[in-house]
Image (cartoon, rainbow, N blue to C red):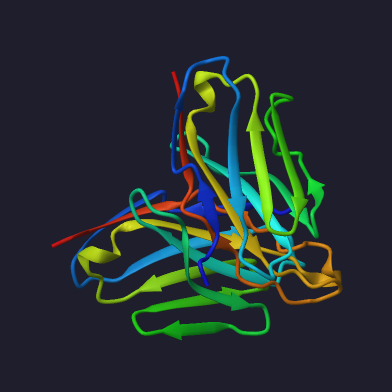
Amino acid sequence: GENVEQHPSTLSVQEGDSAVIKCTYSDSASNYFPWYKQELGKRPQLIIDIRSNVGEKKDQRIAVTLNKTAKHFSLHITETQPEDSAVYFCAASNSAGGTSYGKLTFGQGTILTVHP
Amino acid sequence: DAGVIQSPRHEVTEMGQEVTLRCKPISGHNSLFWYRQTMMRGLELLIYFNNNVPIDDSGMPEDRFSAKMPNASFSTLKIQPSEPRDSAVYFCASSLALAGARVTDTQYFGPGTRLTVL
């Protein structure tokens, strides 16, 4: 089955700096890669996702890049703000053939702390 | 849309007691997922259903855990008997998975149930 590794486990930055979180996956058939943000005591919420036919996607201060050859994808947050402090999870899914039923394999999470 | 609904939000019980967690997925979604989250083990997938049928329960830790989905709008996760190591936040999530589709839709999480077993 799919295995997703996420690094780093913790990341501390100063407000205004950029933050990068990286994930690798094992199943070359995976074709959907969402990122979730989980604030303390809250539920994971989707912040951005990318599909395998796209190499990069951007939404304001956040962007995700995908390298299918190397089987890794990354989350980039620019101009970080204290409210970006949270746990970030990457995930991967293989929907080819319609047999995944939407199952996601999650990385272990990255605790991002943005210092004012 | 009300989103995924879970109840109760908090549950405190004593070791040996039966615990039932409830979930109502987003209307129209046909895949439902139960996760457990702890500091030590992160986010673990316990079981998931598609069209009310259990697809994979390999993440269920022990026979003490069971899950049902009697209809498209309701699922339960039961722990009997409960143990202190079951203390965690349990999330339910739902998505729309179309048969034969090559596109995975967004998975939405409920607010979670924080379970404490004393």
x, y percent for residue A87: 39, 54
Say above or below: B115 vs A26. Answer: above
Say above or below: A12 vs B90. Answer: below
x, y percent for residue B97: 75, 69
Q: Residue at x 53, y 61 (%)?
A: A90
x, y percent for residue A64: 49, 76
Q: Residue at x 68, y 84 (%)?
A: A53
The furthest residue to the top:
B16
Q: Which of the 4 image quadrants contains residue A104?
A: bottom right
Is residue A1 visible in the rendered structure shown here?
A: no
Q: Which of the 4 image quadrants contains residue A12?
A: bottom left
Label tally:
0
- B92 relative to B14 in the view: left or right: right
Q: Residue at x 72, y 60 (%)?
A: B31
Is residue B27 visible in the rendered structure shown here?
A: yes
Q: Quadrant of the C terminus of chain B?
A: top left
Q: Residue at x 75, y 48 (%)?
A: B69
x, y percent for residue A67: 60, 74
Q: In terms of depth relative to the viewer, which is nearer, B11 or B83?
A: B11
Q: In terms of depth relative to the viewer, which is nearer, B30 or A33?
A: B30
Q: Which of the 4 image quadrants contains residue A96?
A: bottom right
Q: In terms of depth relative to the viewer, which is nearer, A41 or A79?
A: A41
